[in-house]
Amino acid sequence: MKTTFAGAINVGLRRALEDDPRVVLMGEDIGRLGGVFRVTDTLQKDFGNNRVIDTPLAESGIVGTAFGMALRGLRPVCEIQFDGFVYPAFDQIVCQVAKIHYRTKGKVVAPITIRIPYGGGIGSVEHHSESPEAYFAHTAGLRVVSPSTPTDAYLMIRQAISLDDPVIFFEPKRRYWDKADVDFDRLDRGEGLPLDRARVCVTGSDATVVAYGGTVATALAAAKIADTEGHSLEVIDLRSLSPIDFDTVAESVRKTGRLVVVHEAPVSGGLGAEIAARITERCFYHLEAPVLRVGGFDIPYPPAKLERHHLPDPDRVLAAVDRTLAA
């Protein structure tokens, strides 16, 4: 059926609640309101306020309570209302949730999924458009993922909830209204990619462009323009940010000899730096030019009227492609 990105997550949450009585949703305004983006719309009505819980405005309390629930055998799914609101819960996530499995020598698990709408492109205010994925990808013990399509939104939320590992589930909010045909039953039969596998969206021969989340559509738009100019770009959607599927990226770079990495987060210290370093190590003798990065500028996220200058767009991606092809 044709559905939006947000609608696909809603269906995924609904089926998880139906399939497993241990699954519990919790977050600010997710019940009666259905969440600020209506991702959880009608779920409290259908499953009750013991399964879909409206919490106080206290992110540390949300994640801390979820941690206790997980220790008692439940599978909580937390919603952090906006990316910039996750920091009060940072200690709970990186010091407790991420480490309990290692600390107990594998005897205790924390099957918690933490949903975080992230990124810009919706003209929002301060603390509502950030890209904090590198903080969590740096933390051992967490899986970090970010779907870019309605199909992956459904598939990956189902996979995340089923895992015994804690998962940080970044949802690119500017893609919430993108629509596509999604075959939910086929995906439930296991026909989609594993959670930690990257996808080659478009094959090409001149340069590889790696993106994730909200910037995948940007990279695909750049590839279409490049095709009209006689350049063939291979576009890879990472999907998983920790662990990263370096094998898929390396295989592509060995073919194209060039790599451009795109993300919304500031370039300094971003995931693009880790990807550049790893691919340089693995593909040094195949690279025809240095790995280039296209990202946000090293500034706090700007006001809404300036965000189009801050976010990577096809022109900035193509400028990097031109630089790597000219090297």
Image (cartoon, grey):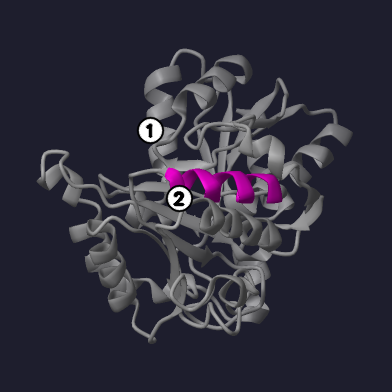
x, y percent for residue 8: 68, 56
Q: Residue at x 79, y 28 (%)?
A: 231
Q: Is residue 161 left or right of residue 64?
A: right
Image quadrant assignment for residue 60: bottom left
> Is residue 157 within the magenta segment?
yes
Type of the residue with mark 1? Ala
Q: Residue at x 63, y 20 (%)?
A: 256
Q: Label 1: which residue?
A: 277
Q: Residue at x 61, y 72 (%)?
A: 46
> Considering the numbered disc 2 on the image, is that residue within a helix, a strand or a loop?
helix
Q: Residue at x 11, y 47 (%)?
A: 103
* Mark 2 nearby-residue class (10 Å; few <14, some 14–19, many ≥20): many
> Considering the numbered disc 1 on the image, is that residue within a helix, a strand or a loop?
helix
Task: Report the predominant secondary structure element of the magenta stretch.
Answer: helix
Q: Residue furthest left?
A: 104
Task: Answer yes or no: is residue 54 visible.
Answer: yes
Q: Which residues are magenta?
A: 150-162
65 versus 235 height, above or below: below
> Is residue 185 within the magenta segment?
no
Q: Of tags 2 and 1, which is closer to the observer?
A: 2
Type of the residue with mark 2? Ile
x, y percent for residue 49: 48, 79
As drawn, the label of residue 224 is none
| Residue sitting nearer the eye, 272 or 69 | 69
Count of numbered circles in the view: 2
